[in-house]
Amino acid sequence: MSTAVQMQEAQSKSSKAKAQAEVANAQERLDKYNERLSEVKSDSLPKVEVGTLEEVLTKMENDTEGKFAEVMFIPPGATSN
């Protein structure tokens, strides 16, 4: 095998390895952006739960993660005209 052919094969392997690394990097970025997008989509709609006042107050007292930091109490009939 000639030196020129060997050099061409080495360059081909090197460029293939670089291309595979770039594809892997692009896939990682795509996965990360898709994860962010799904988080934004799920966070954009408010979560509505119905419960008794006592139940909600108990959950608020025991909340250590901040899930009940943005609770709103809406009295019956407040949303109807």
Image (cartoon, rainbow, N blue to C red):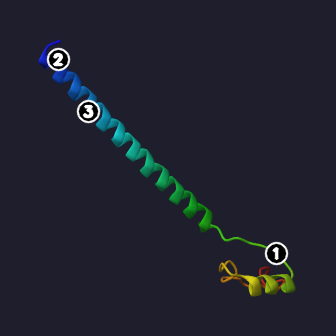
The quarter of the image holding the C terminus is: bottom right
Residue type of the residue flagged with mark 2: Val
- Examine the rendered structure and indicate whether residue 17 appears above or below residue 47: above
Which comes sooner in the sequence, label 2 or label 3?
2
Q: In this figure, which residue is indicated by the disc labeled 2?
A: 5
Identity of the residue drawn at 70% across and 70% down:
47
Q: Which mark is residue 50?
A: 1
Q: Which mark is residue 31?
A: none
Image quarter of residue 62? bottom right
Residue 39 location (% of width, % of height): 57, 62
The quarter of the image holding the N terminus is: top left
Which comes sooner in the sequence, label 1 or label 3?
3
Left or right for 79, reference 36? right
Q: Nearer the viewer, mark 1 or mark 3?
A: 3
Residue 53 location (% of width, % of height): 84, 85
Left or right for 64, reference 58? left
Image quarter of residue 71? bottom right
Distance Cα–Cα, label 2 vs label 1: 73 Å
Identity of the residue drawn at 76% across and 87% down:
61
Q: Nearer the viewer, mark 2 or mark 1?
A: 2
Image quarter of residue 11? top left
Identity of the residue drawn at 48% across and 55% down:
32
**Residue 73 can be seen in this image:** no
Residue type of the residue flagged with mark 3: Ser
Residue 72 location (% of width, % of height): 72, 84
Residue type of the residue flagged with mark 1: Val
Counting other residues with Cα less than 10 Å from the Cα at mark 3, is it few (<14), some (14-19), or many (20 or more)? Answer: few
Counting other residues with Cα less than 10 Å from the Cα at mark 1, is it few (<14), some (14-19), or many (20 or more)? Answer: few
Q: Which mark is residue 15?
A: 3
Name the residue nearer the viewer: 5 or 57.
Answer: 5
